[in-house]
Amino acid sequence: MRWNKQQSANLSLWALDSRGLSWPLSCCLLLVACCWAFAQRPPAPHPPEQKQIAIYSPEATYTLPIVSRNGQDYIGLFEVLEPLGRVSAKPERNKWNITFENRTAQFTTGQITFRVQNTETRLTAPFVFENARGFVSLHDLTHVLQEFLPNHLIDFHEAARRLFLDQAEVTYAAELKSGATGILILSFSAPVNPFIATEQGKLRMVFRHQALLPNAQAQKVDFNDRLISSLVYAENNGAAELTVNTTWPVLASFGPDRKTITVAPVSPPAWAVSQPHPVNPTSAVGPGPQTVVAAPAAAPPPMRSFIVIIDPAHGGDDRGGSLGGKLSEKDMDLALARRLHNELQARGLISRLLRDGDTTIPLDQRASLTNAAVPSLYISVHSAGSGSGVHLFTANLQPSLQTQVFLPWSTAQSPYVSTSQSVAGAIATELLKRDIPTLDLSASVGPVDMIAAPALVVEVAVPSGKSLSGLNSPQYQEAVCSAVADAVASMRGRLPHGESTP
């Protein structure tokens, strides 16, 4: 910080005046002076938002980080193709060969041409090769993908960094409820799970995992309604957003199939009520998407503690996959789980390891032990010798509302799918901040389907452009586990028992 002459003079006078004062009072004066000087500093600027691209396909929906090279946006080509099929890459001096399914392309460092099946094709920006990874300009991505996916439909919204493959889109329609004031019904072509937030005069819904496209009629719909004035669609940085502009506080609630969202006033003003239109008083919009439907209870439930159950996969007789040499997946899973446990503890979050040794635990028993602990979050830790970056899996179940005490064992995760996806999204965001490629997928992975709490799988694969030994890198492991821990800490208020104190 720079000091001006007046500030220095003031402090000098204080120092001279304090010579005859007692030592404690002199210290107090000095502390006041330091605090005043600190307050004069300008606020630290917010770090720029990490650029990312969202890719939607029938095979997977995933996000990848954007890097800046030569003043342009670039994307790792291997990471783009990996979730879509079999891909391999091999560097040869200043050339980089990449094979996807049965098509091979050769790129040359710094060149604006590449060869596919002996046919030369031009780029608009030079190919970049660094740290064993190949990067193409974001502006060239559609052109490059057409060479690898000639029979597929590719729709790239470059300004918003959203890429759609084979019409993997979700559409919506909006209408005001007939005969009602301030009740808007949004209908979607597929189940959705947006992040929902309210602010003065607005209700915002951010869609990161759904390939939402604008209404066929217009991106902005104006309503002749005194409570809800308009609905606006926008997209940016790999996400789509719907904003409901209002003149009165509103709530959003999901239909049972999550294909509809009803936006209605919390408590309509008197002039808007001709006949009462009851709104479920237990429906809530907090920092994320949720609709709570609670049956009357005779007594409040006992206070539970916030706790994260970390489950190192495999163990004992189940070695898991081979990670080269004598290293087995079960050992790597345990090492990663212990590191994640330490990272959570460092943030003041209580966590427990489901196994802390080489123990055989069947899937059903893992689910039983976890459910008995009534956790706030369950994380199954896996590792993989194939692929790159981190793969996040949530249950491939239809989200539902929890309206009963006893849940079917095989689908106990169903009421928690939406929250689980939100946690996965938060983890993906933190990983992308650290330039770690991330796949956010839905799959049936045991024992997640049987967990009656928010749950997901974190599978740590090899760092991008590194050999299998890179999985053993302490720096890489720390980056992954700190990202997961930061995300869990940020999500605490949206998880069960999140308000309890350790």
Image (cartoon, rainbow, N blue to C red):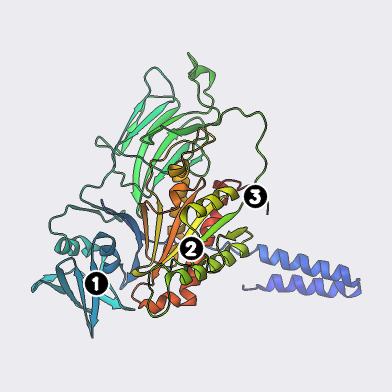
Kindly report the distance in space between the C-alpha atoms of the residues bearing marks 3 and 1.
Answer: 46 Å
**Along the viewing direction, whichever of 1 and 429 lies nearer the viewer:** 429
Residue drawn at point x = 75 percent, y = 70 percent: 10
* Residue highlighted by disc 1: 88
Looking at the picture, does residue 294 appear above or below residue 105? above
Q: Which residue is mark 2?
A: 47
Question: Pointer 1: residues within 10 angstroms few (<14), some, or many (20+)?
Answer: some
The tag earlier along the polypeptide, 3 or 1, is 1
Which residue is tagged 3? 305
Q: Nearer the viewer, mark 2 or mark 1?
A: 1
**Drawn side of residue 373 relative to residue 161, left or right:** right
Work out which residue is located at the far bottom of the displayed protein and give it. Answer: 93
Residue drawn at point x = 25 percent, y = 67 percent: 137
Q: Is residue 66 above or below residue 250?
A: below
Mark 1 residue element:
strand
- Along the viewing direction, whichever of 480 and 181 lies nearer the viewer: 480
- Circle 3 crowding by C-alpha within 10 Å: few under 14, some 14–19, many from 20: some
Residue 482 x %, y %: 52, 66
Report the front residue among 118 and 354.
354
- Distance, label 2 to label 3, CA atoms, is 34 Å
Q: Is residue 418 visible?
A: no
Closest to the observer, 277 or 340: 340
Q: Secondary structure at mark 3?
A: loop
Horizontal side of residue 118 vs 175, given as left or right? left
Q: Residue furthest top?
A: 274
- At a point 34% along the width and 56% down the height, the residue shown is 62
Q: Position of residue 459 (x, y in %)?
A: 42, 63
Q: Position of residue 261 (x, y in %)?
A: 40, 33
